[in-house]
Image: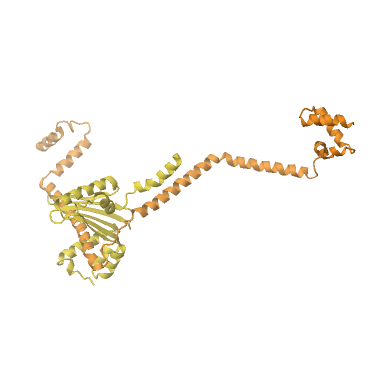
């Protein structure tokens, strides 16, 4: 009996040890009906189709190596504060292997970026942000993250009059 | 031999009361050929022991003996393996641990893959949110860069005399047993300023 218990424990151990996907865990653990969240998931297939469909080279470079983009957001001020703290709690509790890359704490906005680098081809990024205009946003990006392209993307988008003017087919 | 004592002996035999000598008498009796008809069915029972006692090794006895010895030496080899049983146990345990670790690794990798439903079916609709997400990341990185620059500007505005601080460090390393008192009451700094005044 003791052996059976130990064998079962050893099989259950990896599932307890590896927390799974951050957004899934966050929604499972903290989402409440009284505090509605918006969730957007973009997987590898859709990212590949987006890369094929756009003529913008910066966008192509930014999307082509990514595996997923997931977003959770809330616009309500009180809910945003609640979820912002809960997201940080979850990082500390179950995702401590992520390194804190960025932490900005200003009066009108707070930003935290955590990252785990598994290999050159696989990085996982968690962005937790709250600000007065957009509320709470939790964004996870998985895959080969090209920060240079992302930075250029931001500049090109800012230089143009918004994403609607981008060269989509 | 008269039949009557034989019947008595047989009766004792069936009652398990015969002595070895009496049993020998019975066996000798049944070796005779002129047995009463009612006793002939008992002949094999009493002649069996005599026949077995007269058994001699067969012609293949030596070969069988050698084969038996070879078999026993094979057993000895098996015993040699048993000597290494603890090592085999360790090897099997290590194999199990490595196997379990690898399975855990692959299972966890599978488990860590995000499982979700795609929000969009149209890439043109998805690109708006995807771009928004990447812009948020870019903004976060830029905000961090700006915050770092602001901190540097702030430190710059403090007008710290870095050269004095550097020379202070040099003084402390060059004169470890000198008059300087590094950390009790600010004596180091006072001495440095005194030196500068003297110059």
Residue B11 visible somewhere in the drawing: yes
- Residue A70 in percent (x, y) is at 26, 58
Residue A135 in which image quadrant = bottom left
The hue used for chain A is yellow
Q: Nearer the viewer, residue B42 or B109?
A: B42
Left or right of residue B102: residue A86: left
Q: Residue at x 85, y 39 (%)?
A: B40
- Residue B69 in percent (x, y) is at 71, 41
- Position of B89 relative to B137 (above/below): above
Q: Residue at x 69, y 43 (%)?
A: B70
The hue used for chain B is orange
Q: Nearer the viewer, residue B147 or B63?
A: B63
- Residue A81 in percent (x, y) is at 17, 49
Taking the view exactly as shown, the residue that stands out farthest to the bottom is A169
Q: Residue at x 29, y 47 (%)?
A: A94
Residue B25 in which image quadrant = top right
Left or right of residue B52: residue A54: left
| Image quarter hosting the N terminus of chain B | top right
Left or right of residue B58: residue B199: left
């Amino acid at each position: 009996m003791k052996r059976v218990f130990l064998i079962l424990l050893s099989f259950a151990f990896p599932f307890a040890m590896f927390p799974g996907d951050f957004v899934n865990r966050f929604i499972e653990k903290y989402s409440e009906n009284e505090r509605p969240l918006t969730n957007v998931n973009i997987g590898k297939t859709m990212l590949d189709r987006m890369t094929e469909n756009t003529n913008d080279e910066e966008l192509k470079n930014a999307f082509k190596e990514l595996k997923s983009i997931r977003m959770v957001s809330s616009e309500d001020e009180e809910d945003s504060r609640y979820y912002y703290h809960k997201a940080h709690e979850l990082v500390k509790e179950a995702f401590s292997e992520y390194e804190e890359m960025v932490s900005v704490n200003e009066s009108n906005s707070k930003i935290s970026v955590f990252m785990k680098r598994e290999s050159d081809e696989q990085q996982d990024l968690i962005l937790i942000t709250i600000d007065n205009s957009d509320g709470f946003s939790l964004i996870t990006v998985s895959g080969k993250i090209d920060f240079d392209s992302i930075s250029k993307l931001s500049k090109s988008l800012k230089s143009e009059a918004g994403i609607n003017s981008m060269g989509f087919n | 031999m008269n039949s009557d004592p034989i019947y008595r002996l047989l009766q004792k035999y069936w009652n398990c009361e015969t002595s070895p000598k009496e049993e020998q008498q019975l066996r000798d009796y049944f070796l005779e050929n002129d047995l009463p008809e009612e006793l002939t069915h008992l002949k094999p029972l009493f002649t069996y022991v005599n026949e077995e006692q007269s058994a001699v090794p067969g012609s293949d006895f030596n070969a069988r003996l050698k084969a038996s010895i070879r078999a026993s030496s094979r057993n000895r080899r098996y015993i040699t393996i048993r000597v290494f049983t603890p090592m085999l146990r360790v090897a099997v345990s290590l194999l199990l641990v490595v196997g379990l670790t690898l399975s855990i690794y692959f299972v966890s990798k599978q488990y860590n893959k995000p499982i979700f439903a795609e929000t969009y079916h149209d890439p043109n609709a998805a690109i708006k949110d995807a771009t928004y997400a990447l812009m948020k990341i870019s903004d976060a990185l830029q905000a961090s860069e700006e915050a770092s620059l602001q901190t540097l500007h702030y430190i710059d505005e403090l007008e710290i005399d870095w050269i004095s601080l550097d020379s202070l460090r040099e003084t402390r390393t060059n004169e470890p047993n000198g008059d300087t008192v590094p950390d009790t009451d600010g004596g180091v700094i006072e001495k440095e300023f005194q030196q500068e005044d003297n110059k």
